[in-house]
Amino acid sequence: MKAIMFYGIKKLELVDIPIPSTKSDEMLIKVEACSICGSDLRIFNHGSPRIQQPTILGHEIVGTIEVLGENIKSRYEGLYYEGQRVGISPAVPCGRCYWCKNKSQNVCDNLKIFGYEFWGGFSQFLHIPAVAIENRCIIPVPEVLSTSEATLIEPLACVLNAQQFVGVNSSDTILIIGAGVMGLLHYKLASFYGAQEIIICDKVPERIRNAKALGIENACINSELKQRLNERGADLVIVAAGTKSALEDAFKYVAKRGKIVLFAGLPGEEERQIISCNQIHYNELTVVGTHGSTPEQYKEALRIVLEGKLSLKDLIKKEVTLEEAIAIFRQPNFSNDKPGRVIIFPNK
């Protein structure tokens, strides 16, 4: 099979490797599509301590079951079948630790993620280990949803996890820092939850123009935030850009007794930042981090989209082959141009 192999920082290569074998309690997925996430770009540019090279990146995956192990056929009778279209909830929990038993599988003590510890979806086929099936990480996806849209269910589930964790109130002033795909998903979901006043900002003008083209009038450059916000500031600030300046703006514009959600991760060399503990203390701020999602949240995100309550079509930028994807990773300003997911179709 063809795959994009990651050999280290800024080292990708198109390779031809054997199709993984499948045991009786495992699956083999033929990958329809896998979108390029910002975390894939961060790994490409900065690496990750979680990853052992060489490996295959990609965790926003949809495909069809190519091979179904014999034990799976009998154990999950009627749930899975060969030729079935499925999505992947990529954070695979152990199912045994404290967090798994308390419905917080995304922070499992033994978490393994497709595209990190397991090989990911930038390949023609994907091996599914038994632990992913046992923990219901393989989720049927109806054909009515387009392939490209289906890859965006996973990032929407991550956004849903963040907003459920902190709670979105209709009376809150919400500030979303970062108008890339994840920031736009936060805007869409907060609107779905009934938030009345949402401001989205970015330091890249093209992203603000794109947000306004999508019908988001309350979008602005970061430097204009002071004029956009009321004197109190934002009750909820969602940091959807993995930069030091985004974190600084969050503390600058959050209201007293407000909440800050650190949704976007920072590169390893920037992860340690100085924040004002006294501001947190005296202004009674709540600062939380959120990461990934659970299989149940993936299902909920899928339901919201299938019921027509939230559209993903306008977040798709381009569909490419494996060969074309490597060139895209190497574009110097790829992450700063018009936002939208690039979707890899490995079998085209």
Image (cartoon, rainbow, N blue to C red):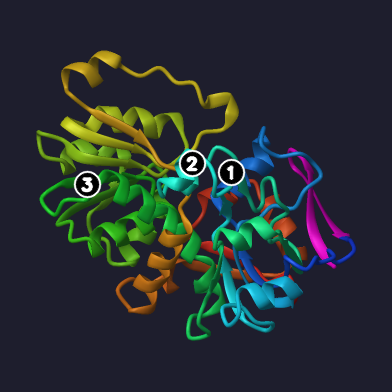
For numbered disc 2, what is the local secondary structure? helix
- What residue span does the magenta drawing correspond to? 1-15
Magenta stretch: residue 6 in it?
yes
The reply to whether residue 157 is in sight is yes
Q: Which residue is mark 3?
A: 174
State yes or no: discs 2 and 1 in contact (Cβ < 8 Å): yes
Q: Which residue is mark 1?
A: 111
State yes or no: discs 1 and 3 in contact (Cβ < 8 Å): no
Depth check: give the residue in front, 333 or 82.
82
> Which numbered disc, 1 or 3, marks the residue that appears first in the sequence?
1
Tell me the amino acid under the disc marked 1. Leu
The reply to whether residue 64 is in sight is no
Locate residue 162 relative to residue 73 in the image: left or right: left
- Residue 107 is marked as 2
Depth check: give the residue in front, 27 or 320.
27
Q: Rate crowding at label 2 as few (under 14), some (14 to 19) or many (20 or more) other CA atoms within 10 Å.
A: many
For numbered disc 3, what is the local secondary structure? strand
Magenta stretch: residue 287 in it?
no
Residue 151 lies in what quarter of the image?
A: bottom right
**Inter-mark Cα distance, 2 to 3:** 26 Å
The quarter of the rendered structure image containing the C terminus is bottom right
Residue at 23%, 41% (x, y): give it.
236
